Amino acid sequence: MTSPTSEPIGSATPNVTITGANDSRQNRTREMQLIPEAMARAHMHDRLREAEAERQAVRLVAARRMQRRAERASLRARRALAMAVMH
């Protein structure tokens, strides 16, 4: 019995290493293509967090302004009441 090719019997190895290398290369290429998308997603996440922090700061400033206004109105009312009681 002779093998149909010039290779010795049992020497034919499947191209597993080549297939694995191609798959690995394709995965790396796919990952490289997804990097800008991941960076854009992270950037948008940061921008959303910054915008939320800015909105919270604006709400806090408005709340403090309203509190000061209410305190001044309360003080005016107390003074008016004291003036009315004294006269």
Image (cartoon, rainbow, N blue to C red):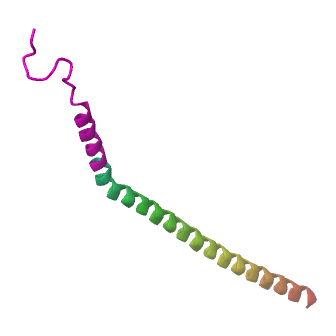
User: Is 3 contained in the magenta span?
Assistant: yes
Left or right placement of residue 43 versus residue 3 in this view: right
The answer to which of 60 and 66 lies nearer the viewer is: 60
| x then y, percent, for residue 51 | 49, 67
| x then y, percent, for residue 58 | 57, 73
| x then y, percent, for residue 85 | 91, 85
Question: Can you say which quadrant of the picture contains the N terminus?
Answer: top left
Residue occupying the far top of the picture? 1
Residue occupying the far bottom of the picture? 87
The answer to which of 42 and 11 lies nearer the viewer is: 11
User: Image quarter for residue 25?
Assistant: top left
Up-down: is 83 above or below 74? below
* Magenta residues (range): 1-29
| x then y, percent, for residue 44 | 41, 62
Question: Can you say which quadrant of the picture contains the C terminus?
Answer: bottom right
Q: Residue at x 22, y 25 (%)?
A: 13
